[in-house]
Image: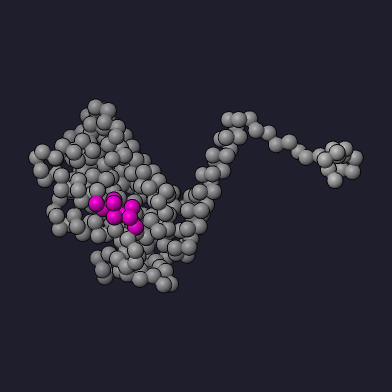
Amino acid sequence: MVTRNPYPRGGGFGGFGLGGPAPRDVLILLGVLFVTFALGFFRSTAIVPAVLQLTPLVWTHGWVWQLATYPFIAATGSGLFFLLDLLILYMFARDVFFGLYRKHFWRLILWSSIGGALAAVIVHVLLTFAGLSSWTPMPFAIMQGQWMLTVIMVAAFATAHADATIYLFFFLALPARWMLWVEILFAFMAYLFTKDLPGFVGICAAVGLSYLYVRSSGSLRGGRRSLREMRLRLEKWWIQRKLDRARRKRGFKVIPGDKGPNVRKGPWVN
């Protein structure tokens, strides 16, 4: 998967992937995924990813921390495909990080992953109480770890750079905005193989939440500069909300100033 460079001077793999500096936060994220992937292959450490991945225990036993930890715990599978997953994740996450910077980068991940997990858990609860839990023998399987993170990063990139060109499988040219629907299509294909309906709903919710987060500041077209503008607008909105809450909590009132020629001035006014 590669894109036509959305920036006039960008370098690297498609203008957003392998060239240029590597954000430390993204490298740490990949490192955590690699470590948790390796832990799953040892009997003495396999318990660590087992209790942190998203499982039905999140609501049957109250393991609510799984709602926030599961995207950072690598999904098991072939080592070669896992490295390919990390490569694709890095290419998109690097661009999104430089557009949003640290605070909003992590907020995007938490907002979309927790929201997607809540949607998936609700579906699983409904299926269980309806006596249809046998329909989902592997709940949440397709939304674990690097797969959910890649969904979020691709959705954020596709929303911000809607007019860029992405070469799917390195030969099929698609407008970046189509990747939102391509992700849902891939998730549906995964659902057909795994019957993981909660996971499919969770991925769809994460795509929608990522889209809403990136679009929340208005139009983002125009490349890296517009992503920075989005970040500034988000920060302005966040600060304004904090000021409004403080004003309501402390009961601040605006007192209009005195005006007119008959205003009596104090002795200190020259």
Query: Would residue 105 be counted in the magenta stretch?
Result: no
Visual colour scheme: one colour
User: Is residue 151 at all visible to an observer of this figure?
Assistant: no
Q: Quadrant of the N terminus?
A: bottom left
Is residue 51 visible in this depiction of the protein? Answer: yes
Q: Nearer the viewer, residue 239 or 270?
A: 270
Question: Which quadrant of the structure image shows residue 100?
Answer: bottom left
Find residue 161 and report its image quarter: bottom left
List the single residue furthest toward the left: 43
Residue 251 locus on image (x, y percent):
63, 30
Residue 148 % position (x, y):
28, 48
Q: 239 above or below 9?
A: above
Q: Identify the residue shown where x is 50% and y is 48%.
A: 235
Q: Residue at x 18, y 38 (%)?
A: 48
For image coordinates 56% across by 43% down, the residue present is 240
Q: Is residue 244 above or below residue 9?
A: above
Residue 202, position as x, y percentages in the image: 31, 43
Q: Main secondary structure of the magenta part?
A: helix
The answer to which of 145 and 187 lies nearer the viewer is 145
Residues shaded magenta: 23-31
Q: Position of residue 42 (x, y in %)?
A: 10, 43
Query: Is 202 left, or right, of 76 in this rendering?
Result: right
Residue sticking out furthest to the front: 268
Depth check, front residue: 184 or 233 = 233
| Residue found at x 31% / y 47% | 203
